[in-house]
Image (spheres, rainbow, N blue to C red):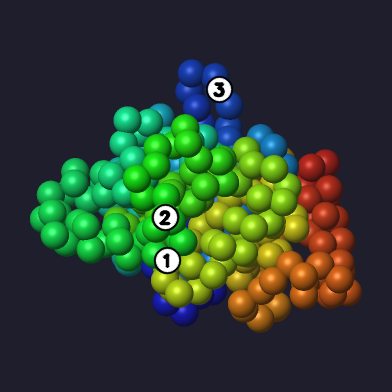
Amino acid sequence: MTRDPILEVCSVSKLFNSSKILAIDNVNLAVERSEFLCILGPNGCGKTTLLNLIAGFKPYFPPTKGEISMTGKQIKGPGSDRVMVFQEQTLFPWLNVQDNIEFGLKIKGVPKAEKRKVSEHYLKLMELEEFKDKYSFQLSGGMNQKVELARALALKPEILLLDEPFAQVDALTRLSLQEELLRVSELEKRTTIFVTHSIQEAIFLGDRICVMTKRPGKIKEEVKVEFPKPRKWANLSDDRRFARLHSRLLSLIQEGAIGNDIK
């Protein structure tokens, strides 16, 4: 058990009544403050359902059974204490980079001077300063995802939720964005829950990895990642410990996919 959980998922199940599909079943999870938790599993295992339940988004929320709480208070729906970055691009094409980063702050009624100060900070942090007047159609997919991250971080959520945010970019850009996210997360010390079906990505980013079984998704096993941070792909990819952990996680996923030894 974690010592100071910011988030607790207690015996949560989700049945979609319209399709009679039980997406996740009896999921228990505790997430520590400042932890980078990766949720790993095959397609269709309920990873995104779990993330959307934590976010409080309909039609996923509320859970059919169980409850989800932050700092001891039950989650009732969406909130600015939890911000999601999606797989698909959600930037507003009529706004430039800086205005996109400031959009959520504007909705919250943050004064103009403070709003500009926050956006300037995240433009610098994400190395986007020279692109602040550009529009999404003028940027690469990787650059747009950096703007998405900056916009989410600007809201200063207690928990950052990431649903396979790099799945739409090419392999080299994905490696670069993973290193960028890790750099920023170490500076920000923000609690992060990252959904992925990439074993390599989970190992590189995570402090801990929760492996899910096939639907209905359950937590099969939790694995701590021992590699110190900061991490660089050039230093990690040839490490024999990386290969051993990769093999262990692959075995867990394969066991879960055929329903063996479900925990």
Which residue is rendered at x = 13% and y = 54% of the image? 112
Q: Position of residue 146 (x, y in %)?
A: 49, 51
Residue type of the residue flagged with mark 3: Lys
Residue type of the residue flagged with mark 2: Glu
Q: Position of residue 204 (x, y in %)?
A: 69, 65
Please rate how many residues cluster around mark 2, counting C-alpha atoms within 10 Å: few if below 14, some from 14 to 19, many from 20.
Answer: few
Quick one: which residue is furthest to the top in this view?
18
> Tag 2, which secondary structure?
helix
Tell me the mark number nearer the camera, choosing from 3 and 2. 2
Residue 215 showing in the rendered view: no
Say if 239 sits above or below 64 in the image. Answer: below
The residue that mark 3 highlights is 20
Which residue is rendered at x = 56% and y = 40% of the image? 141
The residue that mark 1 highlights is 125
Which tag, 2 or 1, sits closer to the chain's start?
1
Please rate how many residues cluster around mark 3, counting C-alpha atoms within 10 Å: few if below 14, some from 14 to 19, many from 20.
Answer: few
> Tag 1, which secondary structure?
helix
Which residue is rendered at x = 83% and y = 55% of the image? 250
